[in-house]
Image: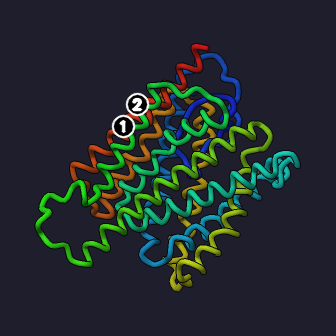
Amino acid sequence: MTHNDDPSSSSVVIAQTESTPLLPKCKQPQHNKRRELIGLVFMTLSALGFSTMSLFVKLSGTNFPSFEIVFARSVIQTLFGLIGCALYGVSPWGKRGVRRWLLLRGLAGTLGLCLFFYSITQLPLADATVVFFLGPAFTAILAAIVLREPFTLFDGICSVACMIGVILVSKPQFLFHTDTSAPVDDGDSISEWKRLFAVLCALVGAMMSAVAYVTVRKIGRGAHYMVHVVYFGLVSIVVSPIGMFLMQKPVLPRTGYEYGMLMLVGISAFVGQCFLNQGLQMAPAGPGTLMRMNDVVFAFLFGIFILHEYPDIYSISGASIIVIMTSAMGIHKIYSHTRK
């Protein structure tokens, strides 16, 4: 999984796998309310696109292993990326000096996407999305180490609060099992460990997305956003079959419905990407960051009304903490940057 505007032009921290912004921001014209409003609408449609992708991953996960879903999505993404490069008149291979960084970005994004897709197939859709939403916290920490960006006490407090939110979402049995005297059968024990492993995958996936984001910042304006799309897709095409054959059993689609589900995963992700790129160019940074919260909102709505996954009070509380804290970190960095 993911989830792209040029991050070198701003210290905005936004959750991502494929949703990582890559397209360089254009200089804004004079204040234009209508343009900004359209930008916010595009950001909301972007969140809808990525949440729809996650929904199709969840629905496909009943028939296909997660690595196979990543492979199908990557083929479609690469195809659209190559077409985009042709339309924009740019080389899909990028400049020689940044190719190794493009490969690193593609590898980190691929690993993050594979882990995220696996967590979606094992966890309720909203829970997997919320844990993966920790990407901004990890990005802030990594950017402070690698790019020497400031990491303030406020960022630290928000990051700790986010980890508390993850605990509430994951609900480990040793903390939330109220009746310790009751025996736990093997099936429950396996289910508990499987859930915690899926949460861990989402966490590591969020870390990988942070690596991808920081790598994009390192590349800066050295590569067109469609080149990033192509590299991400090509690396995924190489890596995902390895995981599919070594750790899972590939399943050949048999019906038009199954082919359609796999295609919709890639199409919805690409549509979300396009809306994100345009929205980040047009929307004001602060409200634009808040629009990223709609990923979680849509995930909860899809989970309740389509998948019939009803969150408990712990999941709702944890999701609220993570969304509020990550959004606060993003907005804090935006206004800290503008005051300099």
Is residue 179 shown left or right of residue 323? left
Specify the label residue 89 is tagged with.
none
- Specify the quadrant of the image occupied by residue 269: bottom right
Rendered location of residue 1, percent (x, y): 56, 58
Quarter the C terminus occupies: top right
- Specify the quadrant of the image occupied by residue 121: bottom left
Which three-letter amino acid code belongs to the residue tagged 1?
Answer: Ala
Is residue 304 shown left or right of residue 323? left
Rendered location of residue 140, percent (x, y): 55, 36
**Residue at x-position 39% and y-position 49%:** 298
Is residue 82 shown left or right of residue 168? right
The residue positioned farthest toward the right in the image shown: 96
Rendered location of residue 37, percent (x, y): 51, 29
Tell me if residue 239 can be seen.
yes
Q: Secondary structure at mark 1?
A: helix
Question: In front: 208, or 43?
Answer: 208
Question: Dot 2 surroundings within 10 Å: few (below 14), some, or many (20 or more)?
Answer: few
Which three-letter amino acid code belongs to the residue tagged 2?
Answer: Ile
Which residue is tagged 1?
161
Which residue is tagged 2?
157
**Residue at x-position 45% and y-position 46%:** 133
Question: In front: 180, or 194?
Answer: 180
Q: Secondary structure at mark 2?
A: helix
